[in-house]
Image: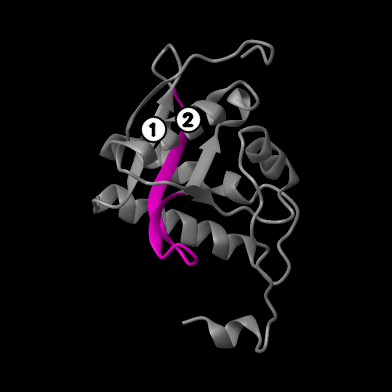
Amino acid sequence: MDPAVRVNVRIRPALAADREFVLGLAPRLVEFDDVPGRDREQMVSRDRAVLARVLDVPAADSALFVAEDQSGRPVGFIHLTTAEDYYSDSTTAHVADVVVVPEASSRGVGAALIAHAETWAVDRGFALLTLNVFVGNRRAREFYERLGFEEEWLRCIKRVRPQAETSG
């Protein structure tokens, strides 16, 4: 793919046949600087388990969509769910994951997926669309800012026991 060419995409609900594509992209969710105190392999494993569950057991409060290029080749996906907004005591639409294949990066696929998420949120009557992003994921943070997202929270963690004692 020529990086200068913008990709026109079609966004559709994920199918069982998309399983390998979606789960195969899970490592892209952690392709940035290390997250202190987190094991990258464990993060990918957890992401895959959650995405597999969404594919296997669809729920009314979540959705998984796949972006395809003009040839019908999958080039990205977005996992949407809901979250509670503490201050308004209301449910919001929430972007759980958004991933684009490397060769389609910076070509409009992510923006198209976020626009689809906005429509999904509005169609369901939500006032807010939220997402979480790691502090060290500078590229994603800049992308979301360009799309109109504002940083609101900074989550701080302190390990009080070794990781092995907290899992399981």
Q: State which quadrant residue 41 falls in.
A: bottom right
Q: In the rendered image, which quarter contains the N terminus?
A: top right
Distance of label 1 from label 2 (alpha carbons): 6 Å
Indicate which disc residue 115 carries: 2
Q: Is residue 138 above or below residue 65?
A: below
Q: Is residue 10 above or below residue 25?
A: above
Q: How many marks?
A: 2
- At x 32% / y 56%, what residue is drawn? 53
Q: Name which residue type carries label 2.
A: Ala
The stretch in magenta equals 74-94
Q: Position of residue 139 (x, y in %)?
A: 72, 40
Q: In this orientation, which residue lies closer to the viewer: 116 or 164?
A: 116
Q: Position of residue 111 (x, y in %)?
A: 55, 28
- At x 59% / y 83%, what residue is drawn? 164
Discs 1, 2 touching: Cβ within 8 Å: yes
Q: Position of residue 27 (x, y in %)?
A: 57, 48
Question: Which residue carries the number 1 mark?
Answer: 119
Q: Is residue 80 magenta?
A: yes
Q: Name which residue type carries label 1.
A: Thr
